[in-house]
Image: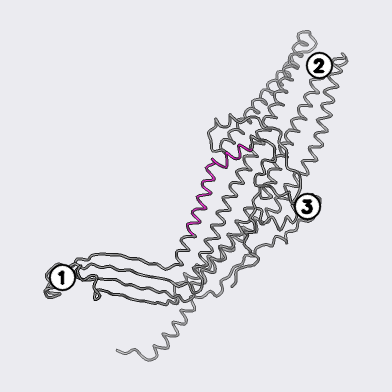
Amino acid sequence: MRSPAFLAPLAAAAALALAGCASTRGLHTDGTPIDAVALHGERSFADVRTTPAAWPASDWWTTLGDEQLDTLVAEALRDNPDLASADARAKEAQSQVDTRYAERLPTVNSAANVAGVHLPTTAAPKPVGGRFNSYPTLYASFSWGLDIWGGKRAAWEAALGQARAAEIDAHAARLALSINVARAYVQLGYAFAEKDVADAQLARAKASHALVEQRVTAGIENQLQMKQAETEIASAEQQVADADGSIDAARIALSVLLGKGPDRGLDIARPKALQPSVLALPPNLTADLIGRRADLVAARWRVEAANRNIAAAKTEFLPNLELSAFAGLTSSTVDTLFSLPARFFMIQPAISLPIFDGGRRRADLDRADAGYDLVVAQYNTTLVGAINDVADKLSSLDSLQTQIAAQQRAVAAARSAWDLSQQRYKAGIGNYLDALSVQQQLLAAEQRAAALDAQRLDTSVRLVQALGGGFDAAGDVPSIAGAPPP
């Protein structure tokens, strides 16, 4: 039965309508990367000295001046298990690169088999029917999907970007580890300083208790003063125990970072007095920070990878051409398998045109657009946070320097008062209880000074991290000035 003539144009119109479903109309990205130059910091950094040497070196921790710290960082970078996880993620990302690259190449396969067939005589007359026949076959196949629109190349480049980001994440993990080791080491040093003050407080409390006990025996003081003296001893003993606990906790934290058991921490000696970094900034901080912070470089590579994913998704809406070929030898006997009549082959060029897929391609492109917007937002957040992180650490260091200078004056005054009280006691003008009371003020001032010094060291280490910790992309930073082309 012949189809009515009007069905032909209707079928053509329906095909055109369905073709319209597989289009990219209305799909686009909304994310726009922030230009680092637009994040002004000139006034915030105006009073800070600038020098190219302010960029941290790759072995920045050696500037703190403690050989034991150098050994601990090297040990952590060698043995910490978290670094193995970062390296494994980088290897996994590289395997995706290899997979995407292989998809761009032709596929060639070969095989050999023997098929055994028994046909009944009702289906085939003798001598073929009624007996078991074997058919050995040798063949090879070739298939190549031509990358006319560059979609496979874009997918490969996207995988390259993700692999580069994962590789830089591994660098960032090493930087974070070295920072954490240095900060734990600073905390260990502060714990020992607290222990010194606590021991001195305990000695002072015991001396005060002994004097009060003598005065009570002589009838000069009463039991109230004795109980107060006993309270001071108990409080001082608590401070000593707390300081010992802080030392143990800092050593255990270092053991974890080193990837070792708690006994490793027991071998860590008291840190030397560390020298914090000199307060300075590199020139062109806002622009150059992009290539000096591993998290920023990794974020930019992810933006670039998302951009290439969009390009790959768009090519799915275009016609595709694939070439395939099949050739081999087959025969009913092994003797004639390699004869010329046993050959067979097929060549099959094929073109495909997306017409209707229920919206799958549009959904894939929409997801790629959303992925781009997400990584752009993450990059913008990282960039804003990075520049303000530097400003925050500089502001904190500036404030700490002022506080330390004031506290040093307070310590000097308290020490002078302590010296004067001792002189008065030795001269018989004052009593020793008054001198011990003055010593308590000195110890409190020294404890506050030690806390400020530790805070300055910790902030100095965090400034090193904010400035990239010695990482240098060496120009390997993708440009993401604008959004993907429509």
Secondary structure of the residue carrying tag 1 is: loop
Tell me where residue 410 sits by quadrant.
top right
Compared to residue 450, the image places residue 225 above or below, namely: above
- Magenta: main secondary structure equals helix
Tell me where residue 274 sits by quadrant.
top right
The residue at which mark 2 appears reads as 432
Q: What residue type is labelled 1?
A: Leu
Q: Is residue 402 visible?
A: yes
Q: What residue type is labelled 3?
A: Phe
Work out which residue is located at the far bottom of the displayed protein and give it: 5
Q: In front here: 80 or 475?
A: 475
* Residue 86 on the magenta segment: yes
Residue 406: x and y, percent? Answer: 82, 36
Label at residue 438: none
Q: In front here: 50 or 32?
A: 50
Residue 369: x and y, percent? Answer: 56, 66
Q: Which amino acid does label 2 sit on?
A: Tyr
Instruction: Measure the C-alpha gap from mark 3 to mark 1.
Output: 91 Å
Residue 3: x and y, percent? Answer: 34, 89
The residue at which mark 3 appears reads as 45
In primary-sequence order, the first of circles 2 and 1 is 1
Work out which residue is located at the far top of the displayed protein and give it: 218
Q: In front here: 186 or 402?
A: 186
In primary-sequence order, the first of circles 2 and 3 is 3
